[in-house]
Image: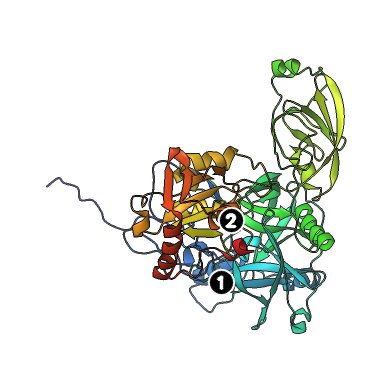
Amino acid sequence: MGETKRKRGRAPKPKTPETATTSMDIDDAAPPPTTEPLSDAGTSQPSRRGRGRPRKAESANITASPERRSSRHASEQNGDAGAVSSEPPLMVPSWESVARVVPAMDSVVKVFCVHTEPNFSLPWQRKRQYSSSSSGFVIGGRRVLTNAHSVEHHTQVKLKKRGSETKYLATVLAIGTECDIAMLTVSDDEFWEGVSPVEFGELPALQDAVTVVGYPIGGDTISVTSGVVSRMEILSYVHGSTELLGLQIDAAINSGNSGGPAFNDKGTCVGIAFQSLKHEDAENIGYVIPTPVIKHFITDYEKNGAYTGFPIIGIEWQKMENPDLRTSMGMKADQKGVRIRRIEPTAPDSHLLQPSDVILSFDGVNIANDGTVPFRHGERIGFSYLVSQKYTGDSAVVKVLRNSQILEFNIKLGTHKRLIPAHINGKPPSYYIIGGFVFSAVSVPYLRSEYGKDYDFDAPVKLLDKHLHAMAESTDEQLVVVSQVLVADINIGYEDIVNTQVLAFNGKPVKNLKNLATMVESCDDEYLKFDLEYNQMVALQTKTAKAATLDILLTHCIPSAMSDDLKS
């Protein structure tokens, strides 16, 4: 009798609209933040999982403007849908503001790309092709800039201008993997009619207004979002696996914005949108490639006819913030700098510097104990920024403290040679097959293909250790592994060998994949003996293995026992 019945009904709507997410699963522990490139794969929409009535796709994120909302409410209060509102009419933007924005907007194009990625598990073939869309913009010299990841492994690239229904075939002139910038051109003269190139502005200051223009996911027409510069520092470029100067902005940047320009309030370009931070505790954190990096890429291409990259000194260094460490190194109270831990053997002038040298200055700019240098008024930045302003082959004056003596060296700067490269620069992966054993050279795309996005957790410990800490002893050194064994009678008992490094062949160390293939092909010994990691050994009869290789290739429809780059 006295029981109170609970009323059933729809839960009240939140005051602020929710942002659509790709997954409805909720975890108690917050996932680590991830930074992702922004090209829109455009293949399928993310599925929604959840219980209850599905949300409307678009209405949750779209709100009426204050002026229109006031007019609508006024009409409803008068009880007549057709009543005239007493609110003031909407303000029409002045022609001067429209004329200033339109030329810059017309320079922004939509980039359509068909990608065909290499298949690292079966390196003699490629994966199924897929399409993506992103953004780009016109610069001087009949060229277009976009992101490198937007046209990576491209088979075909097309561009479409704003307000046009025609897609024009484009040619890729240069791809800068480190800085995530690509340069395109179009041979059709019709494409360039009525298009004005974008002008580049100076590096913006904090809190300067920026407007990001592009073709993000959610529609086919051009999109404009605005915000301010919230941070400027050395950032990790996800696609390039390197660290360069970058801008953090609070303007909304979504998939498909990749390659789109960021304009200041004067209508000049101050950067290129290229990645964003995805985390449940972060909102509207986007990253922009600033003009110094863009101009470096363009100048590099114009000077050399190709992209040569950003140089490095070729050292690993340690901070000198501990006072006891500084005094033990013979530093005076007024001296500051960083200690050299290791030196890259492949650096052009690696013999000049020594471990435990203290770098005091770079090109006359003093380096602090935390590795920073003065940047702008009230700002400091990592001294690698000074290095990134140079070009491959340039020299720099480096002042070091060695055994309490100050020395100066004229250091030649070169590109970074990694033992496990971050990219294969659009080339097909190398492979060599003998007796069913498939040998490959390890790269970061190879590890990602074998172990997924979390390869830095799931890959074998020894491979990860070499990826993070090992240095190449020569410019052509590679880490060669047995990627898999194609089962045949000759390799019985070896089927479980997967991604294991090859250390030596018939007692001779393996320098790279081509070196291994040359030694095996020219071998006249009775046995082919491979020394592998973990003290494993593989032995095959030479004549039997070479004869069985032809049958294995025929069985698996493999066109050749080695990739084309190993034949030359």
Instruction: Please state which of residues 483 and 294 is positioned toward the viewer in this rendering.
Output: 483
For the point 74% across and 53% down, the residue is 309
* 10 Å crowding of disc 1: few (<14), some (14-19), many (20+): few
Name the residue beneath numbered marker 1: 219
The quarter of the picture where residue 474 lies is top right
Mark 1 or 2 closer to N-term? 1
Q: Position of residue 403 (x, y in %)?
A: 80, 19
Residue flagged by tag 2: what amino acid is it? Thr
* 10 Å crowding of disc 2: few (<14), some (14-19), many (20+): few
Q: Is residue 303 visible?
A: yes
The quarter of the picture where residue 272 lies is bottom right
For the point 40% across and 49% down, the residue is 497
What label does residue 518 carry, if any?
A: 2
What label does residue 533 carry, if any?
A: none
Q: Secondary structure at mark 2?
A: helix
User: What is the distance, in whole Å, between disc 1 and disc 2 at their CAs?
Assistant: 54 Å
Instruction: Please state which of residues 298 and 137 is positioned toward the viewer in this rendering.
Output: 298
